[in-house]
Image (cartoon, helix red, strand yellow):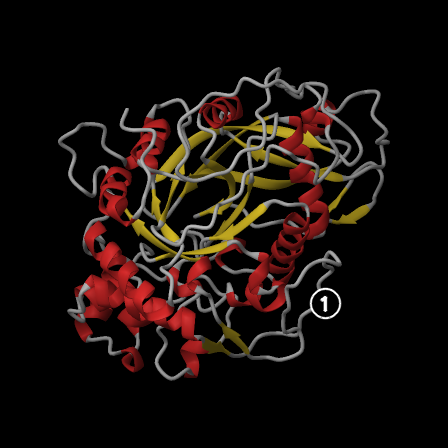
Amino acid sequence: MVVPIIISHDHHVVLALFVSVAIFRGTSSSSAYTPSSMMTSTTVGGGACASSSSSSSSAAAAGRGDNPRRRRLPPNDSAPVIIGYAHDARSGKAERAIRDGCDVIIWSFLHLELSDDDDDAASSSSSSSSSSSSTLGGYVRTDLDLDAVRELRNAHEHVIHLAAFGGWNGPHPPSSSSSSSTKMTMTMTGGRWFDVFDDFNIANGRPFDGVDWDYEGHDDADSPTSRFTLEALDAIVDFSTKAKGAGYIVSMAPAESYLDPTIDGGGFDAEFSLDLCLPPRSYAHDRCGATDDDRSLVRDAGFSHAGRQCYAYLLARAGIDTFDWISVQLYESYSPFAHDVHVGGISREDALMMRVRGFVEGYVVTGLPPMKDVDRPSSSSSSSSSSSSEYEVRVPPSKLVIGIANGWADGSKVCRVDPSSIRRAYERTLAEYGRGFLGVMFWTIEEEGSGDDADDYERLARSLGGEFKDLGKSSACGEL
């Protein structure tokens, strides 16, 4: 079934036709692609560009969690990892970004959708499958060209590829569905949603080494996704812990207001909230030093799409060890970071260090709701707090990623950050804490320039790679 939908990521809108892929437990799609060439296990980061030549046609049918091809980030204590979001795998921009220095490509976006035995989506399941007419399930919907993603993955053995769920105006994880024919209702837990994704990934030749959580709000304040539900947050947690146990990489990309370490002395701004349509605190509230000009700015822009510490729930319940990294979107519109730089006159380097210190040294989020226990693999060392309404957010440098914008940033509601400021902040983090932050992420590869005369913001992957080169950053692939 092909479904038209509009997705936006805060600053621009992509109009696309989405292809639905049905996945049911214990079944396989009759149209599933089984690649004829599968790559061998490889180490990621700074490796030479190479194409796959080893074949293993049975790999696509391997059991859950059994993936010799899945890639991992190597220890990277000398230079930041470069992460870029992308959508079009055939434009040549993603490959250029890899050659410019990207270590990780996060493909946006995928969505978790409910299906029942009446849906057209269900009809793509094999007639010989074990699912009966009473079976309810879910499927992964995306308009990504998965063949192209897999081809790109096969061509560059050192690069990690993640599947991003969410996006601005994107649907949140649904929790239950009903069948009109059977009158049955099924609860779709996070663990079950992971099984749906894992089957989807296997059926499509395993293009993804992990998942990235990028759930956000909606332009329409009355939309259901202008607010999180605890069921949606719990689904993310339970999916994440099961994915981690199966060997997948798990990352998150909260907008800065969703996980904000720069709150001054706690108080109201430290309180957890499910709302995603709040006024941006730095531009709206006296307690944050907002001026009349600040309030007029966001009022005239009609902007009230901030959150407040909502992603802290994920860390509190799942534990920090569940996540390989946390990419904080400093490019959120009218973010505290933008206010510090544009209004407060703080240098970008110092504003970055305020956030590094806040995460590494910790800050307390209050007002968290009671949490259910998390099922974990017996070998897991993660721990979380499920009984207290308070949680101290601590993100070590080894898991912290700075999220910035490239050429699309307007320098007003979205702050531009130059690569030299990133480098200096990295070096200061290394000096203060014994290692630098893990990396830098940018949105989006689609906005990358192509010419050699593109400036630092227009071709950010190249600029970052050049800035980090004498820190030990390898650029073995060269330029396209």
> Up-down: is 194 above or below 144?
below
Please give the name of the residue rendered at 54% of the width and 46% of the height, measured from the top-left corner: 171
Q: Is residue 410 visible?
A: yes
> Up-down: is 259 above or below 362?
above
Please give the name of the residue rendered at 36% of the width and 62% of the height, measured from the top-left corner: 304
Residue 423 in which image quadrant: bottom left
Residue 391 appears at what percent x and percent y?
Answer: 55, 76
Query: Of 308 and 439, which appears nearest the observer?
Result: 439
Q: Is residue 261 visible?
A: no
Residue 217 in the figure: left or right of residue 121: left
Q: Quadrant of the C terminus?
A: top left
> Most extreme residue toward the left, as rendered?
453
Q: Secondary structure at mark 1?
A: loop
Please give the name of the residue rendered at 45% of the width and 65% of the height, measured from the top-left corner: 396
Q: Which residue is mark 1?
A: 373
Query: Of 261 and 356, which appears nearest the observer?
Result: 356
Packing grade of label 1 (10 A; few <14, some 14-19, many >=20) is few
Please give the name of the residue rendered at 23% of the width and 59% of the height, measured from the top-left corner: 424
Please name the amino acid that badge 1 sits on: Asp
Residue 123 appears at what percent x and percent y?
Answer: 73, 24
Residue 2 in which image quadrant: top right
Residue 344 in the figure: left or right of residue 12: left
> Up-down: is 345 above or below 173?
below
Residue 146 appears at what percent x and percent y?
Answer: 53, 26
